[in-house]
Amino acid sequence: MQYKAIRGFRDILPDQVETWNRIEAEAKRIFGLFGFKEIRIPMLEKAELFARGIGQDTDIVSKEMYTFQDRKGTSVAMRPEATASILRACIEHKLYEEYPVLKLFTIGPMFRYERPQKGRSRQFHQINAEIIGDPGPRSDSELIFMLMWFFSSLGLHDLILNVNSLGCPRCRGPFRAELTGYLKRYSAQLCPDCQRRMDTNPLRVFDCKVETCNQVVKGAPSMLDFLCNDCTHHFDSLMAYLKALGMDFVINPHLMRGLDYYTRTTFEVQTQELGAQNAIVGGGRYDKLMKEFGGPDSPAIGFAIGTERVVELSDEHTSQREKGPDIFLAPLGKGAEDKAFMWLQELRKGGLRCEMEYRSLGLKALMRRADRLKARKVLIVGEDELIKGKGILRDMVTKEQRELPLDNVVDELIRFKETSWT
Ligand SMILES: [Zn+2]
Ligand SMILES: [Zn+2]
């Protein structure tokens, strides 16, 4: 019997993990500079938390959640997103009492029972960041600035930042009425779900993935024409801050979120490179959600990055040589092998990534091995070199060779790595 992974669940193999680690380490480094602290939330929560936080009649909750009864009969769900759990944790532990403005991030897998297709898995991964307790717009612009800096530090360019404002409950009422009137005129072109939503929650038509519905919303009225004075001022200030921070962006009036607690700033970053699945991060304000969960009336903003898509975009930026050892030791004969085996451990203590064969092999086989491992340098020490006290250091990229005295070879290599290793 041979086992295979469950459909929609994927192994992340060693060759790729290097890219994942680089992305996650960079997120931690940059978010840390902005004062964000990591929070680790459980994979499993009560199903009703997500029904409340995301909306009972959303696709995520009604069709895609991994919900089941545990042995006591409690209805639990694998988390389909992170925000609901983060807010639940803030309220449960009263984190807001200690920090009036909370900046939190979390990194990890999410679960949705979607049709597996290119770029989508049932276990997928997100990098989330949230600022809780500030109404913006300065915090909005800082969060977006941090996000775009993160992408550029990964070497990702040609990204398009889309921003929009969803207004507040006050100004959304008139917009909703206008939108419903518009949708009614085109109801024949809408899918059955949207025909129903048109009356219950017309904003959700913007989230629909059906092509004819997408066509209809292209001509829909714009929320921006309905913003009240406060919301207009908020959005204008956000754009002024983004410009002052040197950021390019596009105003996209069709960037909507169909849930009531989403307010004001909303944004998305798109790439041209991944075809139809082109958003790599979505985010925005959800000023009403803390209260909805029984916490204080705290405004909040956050984003969720689709890690798989970022990996796909940045994989080419991690060179193969960066993934391999700094140095591969290639001793020939038992005397050299035993010496090299001791150097190997000392070099590792000195911070060099190094490798050596456990078995005895000839020079040709050793060089093939070093190449397979993508080693950057190889130290060749045969019996002759041992007698002369000089090994040969070969650069696997440039193919240059130079002699290296062996009496102090460990310190020599460590110093060499620090000063002139390319
Ligand atoms: Zn408003
Ligand atoms: Zn639809």
Image: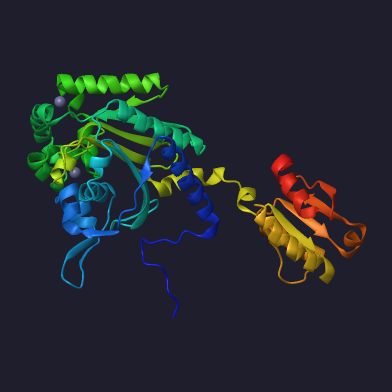
The quarter of the picture where the C terminus appears is top right
Q: Is residue 125 visible?
A: yes
Residue plotted at (92% across, 61% down): 387
Vertical position of residue 218 compared to residue 54: above or below: above
Q: Say left or right for 194 vs 384.
A: left
Residue plotted at (17% across, 72% down): 72
Residue 266 is drawn in which quadrant?
top left
Find the residue positioned furthest to the front.
Answer: 98
Vertical position of residue 308 compared to residue 242: above or below: below
Q: Say left or right for 69 vs 329.
A: left
Of residues 124 and 179, the one drawn nearer to the viewer in this rendering: 124
Residue 346 is drawn in which quadrant?
bottom right
Image quarter for ligand 1 equals top left
Q: Say left or right for 16 vs 375.
A: left
Instruction: Estimate the x, y position of residue 196 in percent, counting from the top left.
Output: 9, 45
The quarter of the picture where the N terminus appears is bottom left
Instruction: Estimate the x, y position of residue 383 in percent, counting from the top left.
Output: 88, 65
